[in-house]
Image: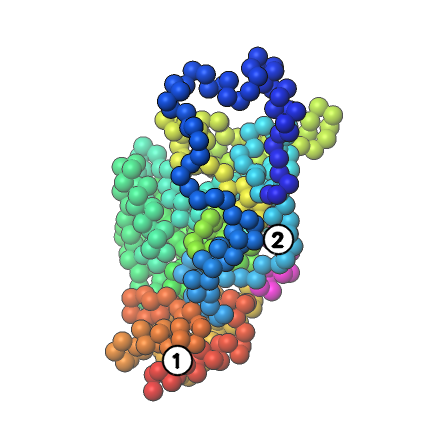
Amino acid sequence: MGSYVPTTAAERGGMLAAIGVKSLEDLYQAVPQEMLLNGTLNIPEGMSELEVREAVTAMAEKNKVYKTVLRGAGAYRHFIPAVVKSITSREELVTCYTPYQAEISQGVLQGTFEFQTMICELTGMDVANASHYDGATAAAETIPMCRDRKRMKAYVSACANPQVIEVMRTYCFASNTELTVVPAKDGRTDLDALKAALGEDAACFYLQQPNYFGQIEDARAIGELVHAAGAKFVMGVNPIACALLPTPREMGADIAVGDGQPLGLDTAFGGPYLGFMATTAAMTRKLPGRIVGQTKDVDGKTGYVLTLSAREQHIRREKASSNICSNQALCAFTAGVYMAAMGEAGMKQCARLCTSKAHYFAAELVKADCKLKYQGEFFHEFVTEAECPNCRKKILDALDAADILGGAEVDGGILWCVTELVSKAQLDKAVSIVKEVLK
């Protein structure tokens, strides 16, 4: 941002002259003198650029950055092509915010439009939005989309990410909506329990695919059950997995949501991330957040504009159906650049590498006397369990000592994740450590 100067001294002087004052201080004549700062603030003197860099680097070195990461559970470490950060770090883009003034925001609007278009291609849906803070927020905001006066109950699978469920609970508490968690069976949603739970007052059911334990759910059968009850079927999806798995639309989903973090965003200590939401044409008008449309100006040239949602949806909470009040334009633009750089072939290759390496790792862990807790198909996450007491802590501590971030501890085992960034040599090293611990 070194070259970013909003106004020159001459421009500021012209603006002051236009309103009839001589200096910036004259703007504060109505403020009592005792409230004005006379002198300097009691803070240390400023540092040079080199000194600041050294100080920040010293603080950053306190963080432990693992060479090998075998943990996901909602935040995934993927390869990010250099072009992504090269483009998104340009000064005119890092300041992008809410594009209300379309005539001066065409670049930001087009970036969001392209992002929405690619999300539709990934999910098979007709329309997508932007501006959700993360996948959990997007999931929670599907509930008011589906709710009406006769259908006030929402349902979520117990196999969804626990943090997503908690965010949904918060939203439901605030809107006086009942949220029911449908139990799991063998690491996947219990279809019998779901069928028994759904009633005439059911508004929607949320299914995560792949689910929190990495298992691939029978989404088509679940969608048929949900629709038979007259409710809407919502799928939370991993955008990388979408490159290989059938689309949510093919599985019968009415709404598809997810976290865009795997699409070119660093894990970054938990944020900022990017929630995406896509739906069918029939539910377009209920879609929260910002929607960018493509149009023509008076000269017939292509242009972009916010469309299909009123301004109060963004800034007047007493009339809004959504709590979205900020803009994730830079994160959405980043995801769009990533998808454009990777292309369809690159996205599929990434997904194939993730799943093939994860299945190799799982097979090797089984050879090392670990046991897969669930036997169903999985994408790039899976759960293992071991017989010995305190095995989980011993395994994770031993991996940590070898500069490997092991899986996340879950009830009864360890949730592992493998992405394309982990090499076969790194996986073999992790397996050898686990095998030694289990001896």
Q: Residue at x 37, y 37 (%)?
A: 144
Where, by quadrant of the figure, is residue 350 drawn? bottom right
Image quadrant in which the C terminus is located: bottom left
Q: Residue at x 50, y 44 (%)?
A: 46
Q: What element carries label 2?
A: helix
Sequence-first tag of 1 and 2: 2
Q: Which residue is drawn at 36% across and 51% down?
A: 164
For disc 2, the marked residue is 84
- Compared with 416, 205 (above or below) is above
Dot label at residue 434 = 1
Q: Which residue lies furthest to the left in this view?
A: 389
Residue 427 position, x and y percent, is: 49, 76
Amino acid type at circle 2 is Val
Comparing 125 with 277, the one in front is 277
Q: Is mark 1 on a helix, strand or loop?
A: helix
Can residue 228 be seen here? The reply is: no
Image mark count = 2
Comparing 323 with 249, the one in front is 323
How far apart are the two marked residues, 1 and 2, measured between alpha carbons? Answer: 36 Å
